[in-house]
Image: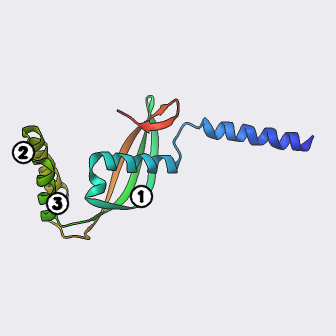
Amino acid sequence: MTVFRWVTLLLVSLLLAACSGKPSDAEAERLFAEQNKQLGIAELFDIENVKRVNGFEQGQRYVVEIQFDLVARMSSDEMVIRLTEKAGTEFFAKARLNSNLEALRSEFGTFEKGKRFTKKRSILLQRTETGWALAV
């Protein structure tokens, strides 16, 4: 009888954990890494010391605030060259490039390879049938 009770308690605990209203730290960090890859940040910076610092529900979605360090893989001048080469000659790609370079300069200024920036950013998540995902 006690084995049955323990199994029941274990199943109820697992069910409650699976139905919790917030993503786990591991899920949030995985989705944060996925977003950085999509945005192209991961190819310009190493991302270290990722830490969830807050989270809250916002309607049907969940906001996770994450603190992290960006470590430049190259100098700002080298990034400009790399991004310019990647954009090529297509008109809209060049327009996006100009916007991205302006944002890069505004956010980070001029820097050398290895420069560390501590940042905080929120990611917006939504629950799907298969778990948490980046909200679109």
**Taking the image as drawn, is residue 54 in sight?**
no
Marking on residue 11 = none
Q: Residue at x 49, y 31 (%)?
A: 128
Give how far apart the Cα atoms at labels 1 and 3 are: 23 Å
Reading the chain from its start, which is encountered first: label 2 or label 1? 1
**Taking the image as drawn, is residue 64 in sight?**
yes
Which element type, helix, strand or loop, lies under badge 1?
strand
Which element type, helix, strand or loop, lies under badge 3?
helix
Q: Residue at x 81, y 41 (%)?
A: 7
Q: Would you identify the image quadrant in which residue 73 lies?
A: bottom left
Reading the chain from its start, which is encountered first: label 1 or label 3? 1
View extreme (right): residue = 1
Look at the image and tell me in which quarter the C terminus lies: top left
27 left or right, relative to 101: right
Give the number of the mark in front: 2 or 1. Answer: 2
Residue type pointed to by label 2: Thr
Give how far apart the Cα atoms at labels 3 and 2 are: 17 Å
52 left or right, relative to 76: right
Q: Residue at x 52, y 29 (%)?
A: 129
Residue 38: % across, % down: 31, 45
Q: Residue at x 14, y 56 (%)?
A: 105
Q: Which residue is mark 1?
A: 50
Residue type pointed to by label 3: Met
Q: Is residue 130 above or below residue 114?
A: above
Look at the image and tell me in which quarter the N terminus lies: top right
Q: Which residue is mark 2?
A: 89
11 left or right, relative to 93: right
Q: Which residue is mark 3?
A: 79
Is there CB contact under 8 Å for labels 2 and 1?
no
